[in-house]
Image (cartoon, helix red, strand yellow):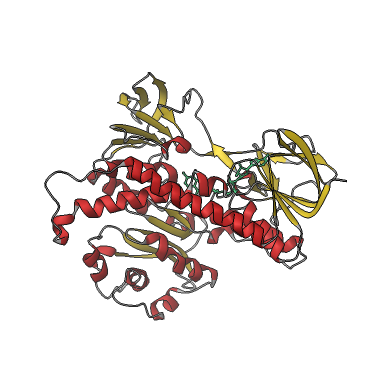
Amino acid sequence: MPASYDVVVIGAGTGGYVAAIRAARLGKTVAVVEKQKSLGGTCLIWGCIPTKALLEHAHALKVIQAATEWGVTIPPGAPTIDMRQVHARKDKVVYGLTRGIELLFKKNKIDWIKGTARLAGGGRVDVVDGQTQTIQASEIVIATGSTPRGVPGIEMDRARIVTSDEAIHLAEIPRSLVVLGSGAVGVEFASIYRRFGSEVTIVELLPRLVPLEDEAISAELEKSFRKQGITVLTGTRVTRAAATADRVTVEAETGDGKIESLAADILLVATGRAPVTTGLGAEELGIRMERGYIRVDSLYRTSAPNVSAIGDVISVDGTAHPQLAHVSSAEGILVAERLAGREVRPLNYDHVPSCTYCDPEIGSVGLTEAEARARGYDVRVGSFPFGVLGRAKMAGETEGFVKIVADARYDEILGVHMIGPRSTELVAEAVLALRLECTVEELIRTIHPHPTFSEAVAEAAHATHGAAIHL
Ligand SMILES: Cc1cc2nc3c(=O)[nH]c(=O)nc-3n(C[C@H](O)[C@H](O)[C@H](O)COP(=O)(O)OP(=O)(O)OC[C@H]3O[C@@H](n4cnc5c(N)ncnc54)[C@H](O)[C@@H]3O)c2cc1C
């Protein structure tokens, strides 16, 4: 008799491990199949956590580089960064968090079954780890996540032409780095390695950086990147890249048809992530797919009975789906609750916050100004620069602004977009505002503490009504 569980989750990323814990807390017997040596998936091992650990090192260096402004005397010579210590600290943070999930599994009596899972039909899952064992599930949750996507014609040798998986482990700071793609991953690595001292060029096919953000945010980031000495090539297509033992040459065609030739130590390809379904057996079971993603309905049911899917591997009702850790976790919680018989409602993807931890950092939620206009709203916007705030001046972090997009008719807040200090933290207030269908007036009447960066949010609300106090 195979071991039998109420719920078997395939994949222990932020989608899968959170779904497992929630299901166990709701009384289900749960097993998680994970093929990596540690739990936590992309977010903990190659993504959110290690990249942000590197960004904290970059920030530490930034503060030290400005030592004279703070009245701190540093012996002559430019401060440098020791990559061995950077990686040691990052790895310690990652290890602590992945071990933490193992302890949570023990505490919640969740079995971690090590190996690669394959759907075998009839609620059975084969797990291969040298040998094959079969487990039985009343419900299966697929949470197999995503992997870096390549670009046709560019052969990734993972040494000179790399993905984010290798870029977080570079033993030495490259003298020069070309980043292909200016989504969250691309601009974060551009920020990290520029601060560490690399010559950085970022190449984006679309006409602006972070193309999913509000246009004003893209413009502000480009201004800041240029000021930091990052070369920005937007509207530019990489046509060829070739690696030798010690160099990469990259050929790119600009919008006006000019061919640029770039040479660098490293080319980072950061052009998005593809779903992981190879060898899973989903197609063989007749599960409906969509461009390689597992298609689910708004409650994450696949086309096969008793098989759900969440996280980076899915497409919801055929629409593009944000590949973010907090989205996968929210979906994991919802699925676990549905499987436990709780009443659940579909998530509102308009209320998903997006955080990009480049320097200056970006936090946004809801509709951009262009999206709100395209949906036919009578749009009213207001923005407020961080540079005017006392708190920002004290911190020496005066770049950026908060911008609010609202509906003029009902005064409802439709979107909040910020770039500048603590934006990835400040955005949480905006998420709540959208969730509660808050009006601009209500945000104005909400007393914000002084002196804080959050005053920029309140002032942006005032500006949306045409009258910021400190402008
Ligand atoms: C560089 C980088 C930075 C990022 N930064 C952020 C950020 O700051 N904030 C944010 O919200 N998101 C960030 N992300 C995105 C985030 O990491 C993903 O959205 C999130 O990890 C998706 O979670 P998931 O559970 O769907 O899949 P994953 O985390 O990819 O987990 C899937 C797991 O399934 C396992 N698996 C796959 N197939 C099988 C199988 N057949 N059998 C057994 N196990 C299997 C894999 O080994 C993996 O552990 C970042 C991503 C990258 C690459």
Residue at image position (36%, 31%) is 255
Q: Is residue 44 shown left or right of residue 225?
A: right
Indicate the quadrant where residue 201 lies. Answer: top left
Residue at image position (85%, 44%) is 122
Between 210 and 82, the residue placed more toward the observer is 82
User: Can residue 190 be seen at all in this image of the molecule?
Assistant: no
User: Can residue 450 be seen at all in this image of the molecule?
Assistant: yes
Against 52, residue 279 (above or below) is: above
Which quadrant of the figure contains the C terminus?
A: bottom left
Residue at image position (40%, 50%) is 53
Against 150, residue 187 (above or below) is: below
Between 249 and 40, the residue placed more toward the observer is 40
Percent coordinates x, y for residue 74 in the rendering: 15, 52
Percent coordinates x, y for residue 375 in the rendering: 52, 57
Residue positioned most to the left:
76
Percent coordinates x, y for residue 204 in the rendering: 39, 37
